[in-house]
Amino acid sequence: MSEIRLYDFELDENCYKVRLLLSVLAVPYRKMAVNMIPGGEHLEPPLLALNPRGSLPILLDGELVLSEAEPIMIYLARAYDAADKWLPSDANGLAMVAMWLQFASRDLHAAWRARRHAMFDASGDEQALHHAARRAFRLMDDHMTAREFDDAAWFVGTAPSLADLALFPAIALSRDFAVEHETYPALRRWMRRVRAIPGFITMPGIPDYY
Amino acid sequence: MQSAWYPIALAEGLERGTSVGTRLFGRELVVWRDAAGSSHVWEDRCPHRGMRLSFGFVRDNHIACLYHGWQYDASARCRYIPAHPDLAVPNSIRVATYASLERLGFVWAYGELDRADPEPLQFAERTVTPVRSLYVEATTAKVLDALASTIDRAVDNAASGTQCSRTASLVSLAISGDEILIAVQPLSEQETALHIVIAGPADVHRGASQKRISAWSEALRRKLETSTSQIRPGATS
């Protein structure tokens, strides 16, 4: 089988989602470093040929070319997690994970944009982005608060899933745009559990020590 | 800030070996629990370069600053400086602390730095079941008004043991047959934290009661953040 290639920018949380999953699945791959900022390499013809949307990450596996973190995660889980641990096969579990994956790409996009604004001077209404990001974090904290009443430790089901890995980066990196973890006690406890998943890795902005 | 006891966290939510930053009237505090289980409340500032200690990490019985790794023991004295491993650190290097204790399932801090002998906390210990901490974008006065309105209704319904005032840090009220205690933390001029427990043992109240009270608190938060006027009696459910 040909080698998996991941077009990756080290400081991007969507790329980190995929690196995190590849690490916990222990799937070998070749990292293709892209100079996204400041180089804008993802908007040059070679990468636009792979992904006309001009976004990262991009994953190549044999003939397959995929873009956007969540679909890539779905593919990797189905293709390389024979036990279906990370993407449930039952209807309820699969739908719940899909709901949180969409939350990660849609509701938490405000957090991605707020971080881009704070770190790289990207355009955006800072106040509106912060408000939307905090609203999303609060929904996550309310969910995990309720889960703890059922002695449940993860967003869906009884074990960590793609949902946990896709939701982790935005809140773990929120201090990059000055949103503290003070008001999210259930997420603080959940983040400690995510960090203890075998194969967990950090990225710049997420301390090795905690 | 008045010299008084303020609730700053739900005791059970503070796991061993962890720290978290919080605020009292806008002042930054770090609260952490050491490996032996004792909690500590300090000013959230490393004396070295002013870095927030809540960004650091807890190991055994000390907390370390993320910036240069200075380590402080449970008495808030600096015991180790990694850049000078052979140095006997002078006792004068220490973090400013708040007197603190745990009661009724809450961590309380006395609102005056380095106060050696604060007056005792008036509330007696009881067995409680923790529910959650709720963070609301509303003034503490508005939160207490809303809770007082809820209590008025509870009193009408002949519930017992309810009390509330505009300056209260602890409110007791009856919700669907459970007696709940709400400790109110003024975070800033615009934000308030409500730390919520159920009076009584966990084997009775965990699960369904916790969910019911948590859902009630989320509805209260929604009303506090959408309404600009005082919540009227009967307005909360």
Image (cartoon, helix red, strand yellow):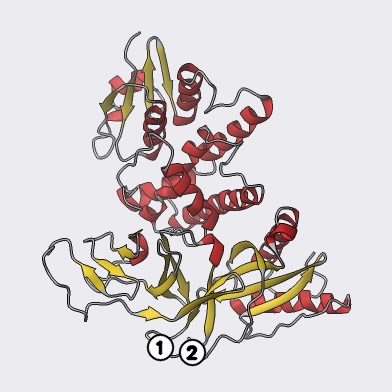
Image position, residue A190 (x, y; %) = 50, 48
Residue on which disc 2 sits: B3
| Crowd band around label 1 with a 10 angstrom C-alpha radius: few (<14), some (14–19), many (20+) | some
Residue B230 visible from this viewpoint = no
Q: Residue A33's quadrant in the figure?
A: top left
Image position, residue B191 (x, y; %) = 54, 71
The first of marks 1 and 2 along the sequence is 2
Callout 2, which amino acid?
Ser
Q: Is residue A94 left or right of residue A197?
A: right
- Among all residues in the image, which is located at the extreme right? B157
Determine the residue positioned at 53% across, 33% down: A161
Residue on which disc 1 sits: B115
Q: Please, which chain is the residue tagged with disc 2 on?
A: B
Determine the residue positioned at 13% across, 62% down: B85
| Crowd band around label 2 with a 10 angstrom C-alpha radius: few (<14), some (14–19), many (20+) | few
Image position, residue B97 (x, y; %) = 37, 79
Q: Residue B154's quadrant in the figure?
A: bottom right
Q: Please, which chain is the residue tagged with disc 1 on?
A: B
Kind of element beneath mark 1: loop
Tell me if label 1 and label 2 are in contact, CB under 8 Å: yes
Marks 1/2: CA–CA distance: 9 Å
Callout 1, which amino acid?
Arg
Kind of element beneath mark 2: loop
The answer to whether marks 1 and 2 sit on the same chain is: yes
Q: Is residue B94 left or right of residue B106?
A: left
Determine the residue positioned at 36% across, 19% down: A50
